[in-house]
């Protein structure tokens, strides 16, 4: 165990046990419940593994309905990464080793017993363990492939547990998802059991953007690949890994619209393998989905990589900046390009898409075409015929991204955007005063306030974070867990609310910078889920946790 400051530990325990505001006590209760009720209960020799969630009333672990006959208990290591961050932070703040030990024990068990021959972990969007049987399972339409999309694992803890296997995993991750290094075909799905090739020794070439590809170069996959390669460099000193992280990141920059500098969520387009006239068939091997759905009315050059709707906006301008700032903070000048690319993109996004008076973003094409209130003319990947495209909110996830980028650069344009977003998210006028009567209950708002407090030492930001923390507890802490509301049945252990509450406590005792870095990643399961009437729903595990 690390040597934590004894005075800090005493102060925290005194606040907890003697009835100070004690925000930490709710996290302690949550964590103790997860340790007691969330782990393996199915084997004679108990495995150090967690389920993904729990029914807060019945205490049954969450299951994925592959069919009405097969309902495995989800134990997905990718969906425990924020839980582990909470556990590590709780050990840091209380001095109690049991929380961090529980996290490291699960990681070690996976490393020692459950890796495939290439070094890949069985986890992610389409593959997990049935905690009851320890079979590898997943949605039956996804083929048990490897997928990480904006998961951003807790590599620092993994590396602390086993240095070699963490580096081996990152190698296997890139090996499985870069389908062709020469052509830079990046795919969201990776095969298990592949023999590792040259990896970082491959030559880097800038090929034409939006070329056809057998992979889908989604940025939500790119974020994970870029982050992992940067961590590989941080741990190993292998400069070629960092160069590959930059090379991949630069492909998305090269694919931005040259006039607006907006985008891009992809830098390739899917290769058409099959023909179809059925607009309901939206798989990528029928060709670029945006071209099929929008091309006749706009331009044959409208591609998926040129669409900027809510999902793409979030990956590009809420999640990617957190990755870029984290990489730059960890590595320094050798990674400054990440920050330069990110800030220029965020300025362009605010210029073209942000509506300050409404605190909304326009759905757009990256050439600047405003698609607000456009009704779809045919079925397709972006929705059914007749669906009307609407603006989407500039929520506190975007605010946090702009705050971190501003703190890293001092860019005044970003500060002006922050003030608009903060005011319209009920947080006050940041250049004058904060709103200590706010009803905001967003963990992202907590982090936004704490980042500003940590940068300025202005106590008003810390007070604001505490008010938001109280709102989080009042609105989301029920039956000993964090749920979507009092009436919801299921709690996902990988929630970010307890981590935000611990960040407040850490800031109050001057230990905010020792907190695990919050990157807004998270695990998920996605695919076919059989509902009670026997039909198949294409959904994610949020369907379970949003059930009342």
Image: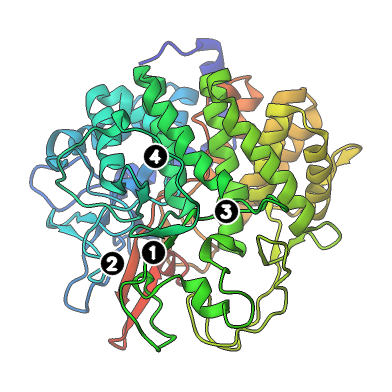
Q: Residue at image x 55%, y 11%?
A: 7
Residue 179 in view = yes
Q: Is 292 on the left-hand or right-hand side of 416?
A: left
Nearer-N-terminus badge (2/3):
2
> Disc 2 vs disc 3: Cβ atoms closer than 8 Å?
no
The Cα–Cα distance between marks 2 and 3, rounded to whole angstroms, is 33 Å
> Disc 3 vs disc 4: Cβ atoms closer than 8 Å?
no
Q: Residue at image x 65%, y 54%?
A: 257
The Cα–Cα distance between marks 2 and 4, rounded to whole angstroms, is 22 Å
Q: Position of residue 390 (x, y in %)?
A: 69, 74
Q: Position of residue 530 (x, y in %)?
A: 29, 78
As displayed, is residue 456 above or below residue 500? above
Nearer-N-terminus badge (3/4):
4
> Disc 2 vs disc 1: Cβ atoms closer than 8 Å?
yes
Nearer-N-terminus badge (2/4):
2
Query: Which residue is farthest right?
Result: 432
The Cα–Cα distance between marks 3 and 4, rounded to whole angstroms, is 23 Å
Quarter of the rendering containing residue 475: bottom right
Residue 541 marker? 1
Q: Nearer the viewer, mark 2 or mark 3?
A: 3
Q: Residues within 10 Å of mark 3 (few under 14, many from 20)?
A: many
Q: Position of residue 13 (x, y in %)?
A: 52, 24
Q: Nearer the viewer, residue 354 or 39?
A: 354
What kind of element bears circle 2? Answer: loop
Q: Which residue is mark 2?
A: 64
Nearer-N-terminus badge (4/1):
4
Q: Which residue is mark 4?
A: 153
Q: Residues within 10 Å of mark 1 (few under 14, many from 20)?
A: many
As displayed, is residue 463 above or below residue 269? above
Residue 481 in view = no
Residue 264 marker? 3
């Amino acid at each position: 165990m690390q040597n934590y400051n004894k005075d800090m530990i005493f102060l925290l325990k005194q606040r907890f046990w003697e009835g100070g505001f004690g925000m930490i006590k709710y996290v302690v209760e949550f964590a103790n419940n997860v340790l007691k009720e969330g782990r393996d209960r199915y084997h004679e020799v108990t495995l150090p593994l967690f389920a993904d969630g729990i029914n807060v009333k019945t205490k049954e672990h969450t299951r994925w309905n592959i069919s009405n006959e097969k309902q495995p208990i989800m134990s997905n290591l990718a969906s425990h990464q924020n839980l582990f961050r909470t556990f590590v932070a709780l050990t840091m703040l209380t001095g109690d080793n049991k929380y961090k030990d529980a996290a490291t024990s699960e990681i070690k068990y996976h490393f020692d017993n459950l890796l495939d021959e290439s070094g890949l972990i069985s986890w992610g969007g389409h593959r997990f363990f049935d905690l009851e049987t320890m079979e590898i399972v997943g949605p039956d339409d996804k083929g048990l492939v490897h997928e990480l999309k904006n998961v951003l694992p807790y590599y620092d803890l993994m590396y602390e547990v086993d240095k070699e296997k963490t580096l081996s995993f990152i190698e296997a991750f890139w090996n499985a998802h870069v389908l062709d290094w020469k052509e830079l075909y990046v795919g969201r799905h990776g095969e298990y059991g592949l023999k590792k090739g040259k990896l970082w020794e491959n030559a880097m070439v800038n090929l034409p953007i939006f070329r056809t590809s057998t992979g889908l170069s989604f940025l939500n996959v790119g974020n994970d690949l870029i982050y992992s390669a940067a961590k590989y460099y941080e741990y190993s000193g292998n400069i070629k890994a960092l160069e590959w992280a930059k090379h991949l990141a630069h492909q998305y920059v090269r694919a931005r619209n040259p006039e607006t500098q907006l985008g891009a969520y992809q830098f390739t387009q899917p290769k058409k393998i099959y023909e179809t006239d059925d607009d309901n068939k939206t798989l990528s091997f029928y060709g670029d989905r945006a071209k099929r759905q929008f091309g006749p009315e706009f331009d044959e050059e409208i591609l998926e990589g040129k669409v900027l709707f809510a999902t793409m906006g979030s990956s590009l301008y809420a999640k990617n900046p957190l990755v870029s700032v984290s990489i730059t903070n960890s590595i320094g000048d050798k990674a400054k390009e990440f920050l330069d690319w990110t800030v220029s993109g965020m300025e362009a996004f605010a210029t073209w898409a942000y509506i300050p008076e409404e605190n909304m973003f326009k759905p757009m094409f990256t050439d600047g075409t405003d698609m607000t209130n456009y009704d779809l003319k045919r079925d397709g990947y972006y929705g059914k015929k007749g669906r009307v495209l609407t603006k989407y909110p500039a929520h506190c996830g975007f605010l946090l991204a702009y705050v971190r980028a501003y703190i890293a650069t001092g860019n005044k344009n970003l500060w002006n955007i922050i003030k608009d977003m903060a005011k319209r998210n009920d947080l006050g006028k940041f250049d004058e005063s904060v709103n200590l009567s706010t009803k905001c209950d967003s963990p992202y708002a907590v982090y936004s306030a704490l980042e500003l407090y940590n940068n300025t030492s202005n106590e008003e930001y810390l007070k604001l974070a505490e008010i938001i923390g109280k709102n989080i507890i009042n609105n989301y802490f029920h039956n000993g867990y964090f749920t979507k509301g009092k009436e919801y049945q299921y709690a996902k252990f990988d929630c970010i609310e307890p981590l935000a509450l611990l960040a407040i406590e850490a800031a109050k005792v001057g230990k905010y910078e020792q907190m695990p870095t919050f990157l807004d990643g998270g695990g998920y399961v996605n695919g076919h889920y059989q509902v009670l009437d026997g039909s198949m729903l294409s959904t994610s595990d949020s369907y379970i946790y949003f059930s009342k």
